Amino acid sequence: MNNKRLRGTRLGSISSESEEGVEFVERHSVTFRTEDGEEFSVNFMVGVDLPYDWQSPRTSKVGRRLDSKGKPIVGDDPNAPSPAAPAVTHWEQLMKRRTIEELEVILKDRIIEMRASGQLNLMPLQKSA
């Protein structure tokens, strides 16, 4: 019965929250220009560190921020994230700690231990007929 009463009320499509008592943050528009000459504006909150580069919402090309005189800002962005460190494999980490000779000695010792405990059974492989 309750489901029938809610039908057609656009439940979920309209917010029941009002904007009363909400203080909106102060914003300003920043202009960017791509290499093709396309200019676009993005709104940022006042007081944040502005990026030097931003992706155009229309063409997805990267644009450079313009200064107050309409000239592109020169230099590297100090706010840009640092590049990710290259992935180091397990083998590279191992080679920092051990030499090949040390690893061969450890391997031989481990094989001897495994044979003595019966964990390693090296029977010759038989060919199937």
Image (tube, helix red, strand yellow):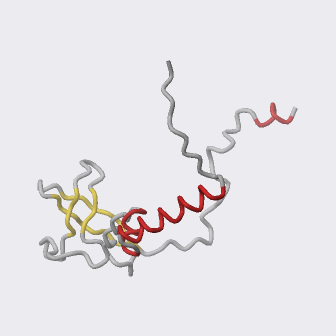
Q: Is residue 12 left or right of residue 41?
A: right
* Nearer the observer, 64 or 92: 92
Which residue is the extreme one toward the top? Answer: 129
Vertical order, 88 against 75 (above or below): above
Task: From the viewer's side, name the closer residue of 26 and 58.
Answer: 58
Give the total of numbered labels. Answer: 0
Q: Establish if 15 lies above or below 90.
A: above
Task: List x then y, in percent, for residue 31.
Answer: 24, 66
Q: Residue at x 27, y 79 (%)?
A: 78
Residue 59 is situated, as x and y percent measured from the top left of the image, at 24, 48
Q: 124 left or right of 33?
A: right
The relative height of residue 21 versus residue 126 in the rendered view (above or below) is: below
In the rendered image, the residue lying farthest to the right is: 1
Residue 96 locus on image (x, y percent): 37, 74
Name the residue furthest bottom. 47
Q: Nearer the viewer, residue 17 or 107?
A: 107
* Image coordinates for residue 128, horizontal then vertical, percent: 51, 22
- The residue at the point 24 percent across, 71 percent down is 52
Judging depth in this view, the residue of 84 and 7 nearest the camera is 84
Choose top left, top right, bottom left or bottom right for residue 85: bottom left
The quarter of the image holding the N terminus is top right
